[in-house]
Image (tube, coloured by chain):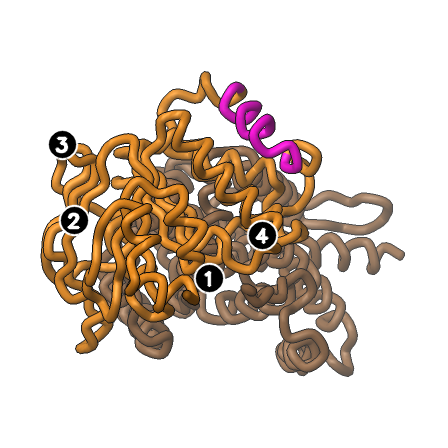
Amino acid sequence: MALLEVNNLEVYYGVIAAIRGISFEVNEGEIVTLIGANGAGKTTTMQSVVGLIPKRGGTVTFDGKDITHTPCHKIVHQGMTQVPEGRRIFQELTVYENLMMGAYSMKDSSGFKNDIEAVYTRFPRLSERRGQIAGTLSGGEQQMLAMGRAIMSHPKLLMLDEPSMGLSPLLVDQVFEIIKDINRDGTTILLVEQNAGKSLAISDRAYVLENGRIVLTGTGEELASSEMVQKAYLGG
Amino acid sequence: MELILSTVINGLSLGGIYAMIALGYTMVYGIAKMLNFAHGDIIMVGGYVIYVFMAFHNPLLAILMAVVFCVILGVVIEKVAYKPLRGASPLAVLITAIGISYLLQSLAQIIFGSANKMVTVYDFGSVTFLGATVQVSALVTLGVTVIVMAALTLFVKYTRIGRAMIAVSEDKGAAQLMGINVDGIITVTFAIGSALAALAGLFYLLKAPSISSTLGAMPGIKAFTAAVIGGIGSIPGAMLGGLLLGIVECISYKITVIAPYTDAIEFSILIIILLVRPTGFLGKKRREKV
């Protein structure tokens, strides 16, 4: 059974249709990517699935429960979270306090010490800067912090919205390595990326989004070698 | 010397009251991003609740009831009047807040009449200290304010709900992604602000044992001024702005030539601050997101 099932989702901004009835699913343990150009509706899809923006139509099922009309904070408590576009870390809090906020939804605080040590091990840079105000971190460090903050809540499904945006090539590689790593440790991943090449390479399956519709789907490999994807997204 | 000492103590005491009210403005602004112009009138409601319950001649009961009643009132106002307007234009929210302000004043006038009511909560008397005579109630006000402010600072910094408040004030969306119930946090904020306003109502009655339906109007505007001077949205800013304004007011009242212009002087400070440093003393510049 799929961990996340999106059925005929529609999202409007006022009278303008941003998402025109898309359906996709993410199975447990997978890395699934939505690729598409700017304005295709990737971020809108992510934000409406997690409940940050309202849905006009369709249904979303997560972990066997209908979450179509569940408010965002409750969805997070059920085990889905998101590293939002632009990271959106809490600029005025320290690195440590940001990670603490990440654990906000954990009912049991006994694992907190271990969890935070695990994040520090995964991101040694954050460990060095734990007392620093997060707004003063570099872009790459902020991305690490946003990812670390998200995994503090032990999500079953982690959604990442453009995690490679604005990062140097070296850091981009590092970010994709970390995503693979988090997935290997048992977290299902839904990724949104403009960097189609890198994301398809680590994806089990992918969907291509155009003007609020899914126009193509397949395994990461299939899409990477598809003529249409190569032309439109891989500069080939 | 004596004059200076008593003026400073009275100034700090009055400033403490302003700070107390300013905290309600600034926290609600920081978290719900709205100016709750009905906040000052909660002070008046608190005063009337104390007046009603002083019939039992038990000041502690009266204070407790005032806090409880104001907290409930603040939360209900938020739910009924402001929550449906979330996402509406700031102007609509502002007009609603002013409407609530008039509603509360009118209700008080209908219930209690327009004549001032007299109520003595407790007579602390006065002490002479280093030659200066000071009302003990001013010292009590100052003491309670310091304790409340310290408690609030610790609450925001070290509790789960407090940190959630910081998160919500910074980024509502990101806060929700942490699993924070933003509506719940806004409710808590209104509750805290209203409790502080009830205490401010008490302090006004200790200063001058008379209450009318417009008791909260001027202090509300002064405290709002204090919040903006300190930097709206900033908790230490509200404290600083409140104390500053209280001291300026008390000094100005002691100088015969400028005493009649005291209010004008206070609001001029606001205008100067807004010209020189629009974010207030401790207000933060919003960093642009890259």
Q: Is residue B171 left or right of residue A55?
A: right
Give the image location of residue B2, x and y in percent.
Answer: 85, 55
| C-alpha gap between disc 2 and disc 1 | 37 Å
Chain B visual colour: brown
**Amino acid, disc 1:** Tyr
Residue identified by numbered label 1: B29
**Amino acid, disc 3:** Met
Q: Say which of marks 2 and 3 sits in front.
A: 3
**Do we see residue B140 in this rendering?**
no
Chain letter for mark 3, please.
Answer: A
Give the structural element (helix, strand or loop) at label 3: loop
Chain A visual colour: orange
| C-alpha gap between disc 4 and disc 1 | 18 Å
Q: Does the magenta portion include A10?
A: no
Q: Which mark is residue A6?
A: 2
Q: Which mark is residue A91?
A: 4
Q: Are marks 4 and 1 on the same chain?
A: no
Q: Quadrant of the C terminus of chain A?
A: bottom left
Earlier sequence position, callout 2 versus callout 3 = 3
| C-alpha gap between disc 2 and disc 4 | 33 Å
